[in-house]
Amino acid sequence: MKATGFISLWTLVSLPCGPLANPAEREDVVKHAIKLHRGKGAVITQRKQWVLESCRKLSGLLRQKNVVLNKLKNAIRAVEKDAGLSDEEKLFQVHTFEIFQKELNESENSVFQAIHGLQRALQGDYKDVVNMKESSRQRLEALREAAIKEEMEYVELLAAEKHQFEALKNMQHQNKSLSMLDEILEDVRRAADRLEEEIEEHAFDDNKSVRGVNFEAVLRVEEDEANSKRNVSKREVEDDLGLSMLIDSQNNQYILTKPRDSTIPRADHHFIKDIVTIGMLSLPCGWLCTTIGLPTMFGYIICGVLLGPSGLNSIKSIVQVETLGEFGVFFTLFLVGLEFSPERLRKVWKISLQGPCYMTVLMIAFGLLWGHLLQIRPTQSVFISTCLSLSSTPLVSRFLAGSVRGDKEGDIDYSSVLLGMLVMQDVQLGLFIAVMPTLIQAGVSTYSSIFKEILRILILIGQILFSLAAVFLLCLVIKTYLIGPYYRKLHTESKGNKEILILGITAFTFLMLTITELLDVSMELGCFLAGALISSQGHMVTEEIMCCIEPIRDFLAIIFFASIGLHVFPTFVIYELTVLLFLTLSVVIMKFVLAVLVLSLILPKTSQYIKWIVSSGLAQVSEFSFVLGSRARRAGIISREVYLLILSVTTLSLLLAPALWRAAIMKCVPRPERRSST
């Protein structure tokens, strides 16, 4: 490497020298070179001796590097000619050698970049701020690019380590016989690997060379593609970033949430396009399901599948779409509470409280039994059992929407029992989320701390029961003193202006949601109680509010069910169809049988006939298992394979739910009422 216009000492160092061995040695060389250049180093003979020693050492390292590179090339050729290795194993070993070659070359390049940087600094004028700024900018760009390259190399090493671990695991499996569960999970693992390869976007690699992308700790893809077609300065681009997409080397994508300059309005156009696309495609999908006799919500789920990662992959703001969909759950439960008056709640509160508790305990007991037989960790068995014990409130609410369900004399309405039990399951969901950190610690605790963990769980249960008591006491105060005057004021102010009424009801719902969330009870319970409190004002009030809120609920429910479809992976279901169908049918049958058993014990004799309908409504798995499963996977409670199994079983159980519900309605509901219930 020739350093033109540079001092003679630096020329002597840079001509024969290759890469340095390590950063400390490089730093010593650079510091000594600066001292020599400034005349503050050793005497002339010592300078010459130091130059000779340094050049000799650097030349030796360069020769050693060339020898190693030649050995790596020979090793690669030997691997390629080895007939005893599979093609996959050959690719893995060659890739490992290439990573080491890249590491050697990058180390050499870093030395040359350091020499060039020092050359620029020595030739520059320390009084010239512009020159110093340019040098600093070049170093910053070099560091950014180096960080990206190092992160990519680290990811490749992680992949190589994973491959090595799996190869060792396969060798161990070949030396011992596998149980049936191990064989199933091994098959699921391979299917999960294929699924991850199919849905992986590799957005980081695809956008590295695209114009409008700057090297930083992440890649930044400009929102305005026209910037790459018109001649603008870098400063103008930075001032007009808008909502750039940030992509890290793990292919996670980010969007701006709070801009530096809040005076300029900005809109997330990706999110807008996603909602518009879902709205347009939901119409034909829902129409098709109506034509063939299926509930429209399955059309919305199909819409999510088509637009999600396993389909066209056109949804960019997945997290934002799911967040908006949660409001569909809130308004659905509000309308459920609006139809569920306090009188009906008092009628079935004992059944609603006892039924879900008994079912959850029985599910956990069966889960621990099967876990012991299959040698699954107790914490994992408890988590899976609790996940599968929950049922979908929005789904059953859609089944019951618009039905005419009058109570028979002396009997209990099946819809009241079913909705009461589902709301209590939502409370259990909040309790389980609160207990999950303790469950995580219990998975790694020794037996000496088991009593502490049990005590902590009991304390948490006590806190939840105290919070529930506080919530219901607050509801009693609101119903007695506040809700009547509040609604009359809203009704008076909203004469000819429905906006005030809608805003007032929505604000009250969000207030109850916030209160229950602050008390560590589920937010869904707050929405349900808000509707139940307003329904206490009479049938006319209920009808008026329902006419205003139902259109909002319907639109947000479309977004919610479409967001469920984003987590449905048909290819994975096809790969493991036999296993998934067996597991799904087993879960559905077990939940149905347990519900029938529990309801047979707690229902009055005059209302025993409704146990079949209620059990059919509880036989599916709640969509909130997606949330619980993702948290448990991040926490290490369950593996990736178990997580995908939970997702697939949940999806298939939701698809089977309408058939089971219709069968129960046909068997148990009289013909005049059956027409409105289906």
Image (cartoon, grey):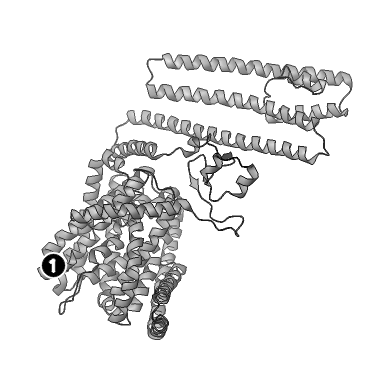
Q: In which quarter of the image is residue 329?
A: bottom left
Task: Classify the position of the N terminus by image quarter.
Answer: top right
Looking at the picture, does residue 591 appear above or below residue 60?
A: below
Question: Is residue 247 visible to the viewer in this orientation of the structure?
Answer: no
Looking at the picture, does residue 288 appear above or below residue 195?
A: below
Residue positioned 34% across, 35% down in the render:
190
Q: Quadrant of residue 101?
A: top right
Q: 241 and 644: which one is in front? A: 241
Residue 552 percent across, percent down from the top left: 36, 66
Please tell me how crowded label 1 is: few (under 14), some (14-19), or many (20+) other residues with Cα within 10 Å. Answer: some
Question: Is residue 433 visible to the viewer in this orientation of the structure?
Answer: yes
Q: 241 and 176: which one is in front? A: 241
Residue positioned 27% across, 68% down in the render:
419
Residue 343 percent across, percent down from the top left: 27, 80
Residue positioned 42% across, 84% down in the render:
489
Looking at the picture, does residue 642 appear above or below residue 664?
A: above
Residue 629 percent across, percent down from the top left: 38, 51
**Circle count:** 1
- Residue linked to disc 1: 669
Q: 466 and 115: which one is in front? A: 115
Q: 307 and 451: which one is in front? A: 307
Q: Quadrant of residue 599?
A: bottom left
Which amino acid does the dot numbered 1 rest on? Val
Residue 579 percent across, percent down from the top left: 25, 42
Q: Residue most toward the front?
A: 230
- Residue 265 is left or right of residue 642, and the answer is right
Q: What element does badge 1 sit on? A: loop
Task: Classify the position of the C terminus by image quarter.
Answer: bottom left
